[in-house]
Amino acid sequence: MNHVENYRGISILCCLGKLFETVVHLFLNNAAKPLISEFQHGFVERPSTTTNLMEYSNTLFPAVESRCQVDSIYVDFSQASDVVPHILVVDKLSDLGFPSWIVDWLKSYLTGRIGFVQVDHEVSASFDCGL
């Protein structure tokens, strides 16, 4: 409980910063849509874990009724995006062919971020949480 690594970060930004991040998110999301598999159900707008389970059920039930063996593995990545290092995301955008000016601009925006953890009235020492 005494380590900042035990806590998930929450960005506290001014209204302009939140608006800015929303606009950038919409732009990147729209640009990346053609690159996302149609079978991706999590972290995208329309499909969800519910639609994933419906598709899985449509495959599973006939197999079970036919007495076939079915092996399944489900992994919960619900908080995985909270722990992905920013540099990996920026590098992936570059690998996907995003223009270098966008990648460089995002690196600049994410570089030099300072964070701290606050629980009730206790505050940790500051630490680097940027690139």
Image: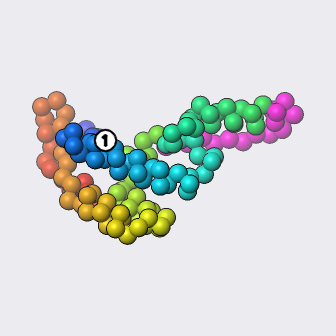
- Residue placed most toward the observer, 28 or 39: 28
The x, y position of residue 74, in whole percent, is 60, 40
The x, y position of residue 114, in whole percent, is 18, 52
Residue sitting at 13 percent across and 35 percent down? 122
Check the image and report above or below for 30 versus 63: below
Whether residue 75 is visible to the viewer of this picture, yes or no, is: yes
The single residue placed furthest to the right in the displayed view is 66
Residue sitting at 25 percent across and 54 percent down? 129
Q: Name the side, left or right, on which 26 lies relative to 49.
A: left
Residue sitting at 19 percent across and 41 percent down? 14
CA neighbours of label 1 inside 10 A, class few (<14), some (14 to 19), many (20+):
few
Q: Could you tell me what secondary structure mostly forms the magenta stretch? A: loop
What amino acid is at disc 1? Arg
Q: Name the side, left or right, on which 131 lies relative to 61.
A: left
Check the image and report above or below for 118 versus 31: above
75 falls in the magenta region: yes
**Quadrant of the rendering where the C terminus is positioned:** bottom left
Residue sitting at 76 percent across and 37 percent down? 59
**Quadrant of the rendering where the N terminus is positioned:** top left
**What residue range appears in magenta?**
62-77
Please identify the quarter of the rendering in which residue 111 is found: bottom left
Whether residue 3 is visible to the viewer of this picture, yes or no, is: no
Q: Name the side, left or right, on which 55 lies relative to 108.
A: right
At mark 1, the secondary structure is loop
The x, y position of residue 51, in whole percent, is 62, 34
Q: Which residue is mark 1?
A: 8
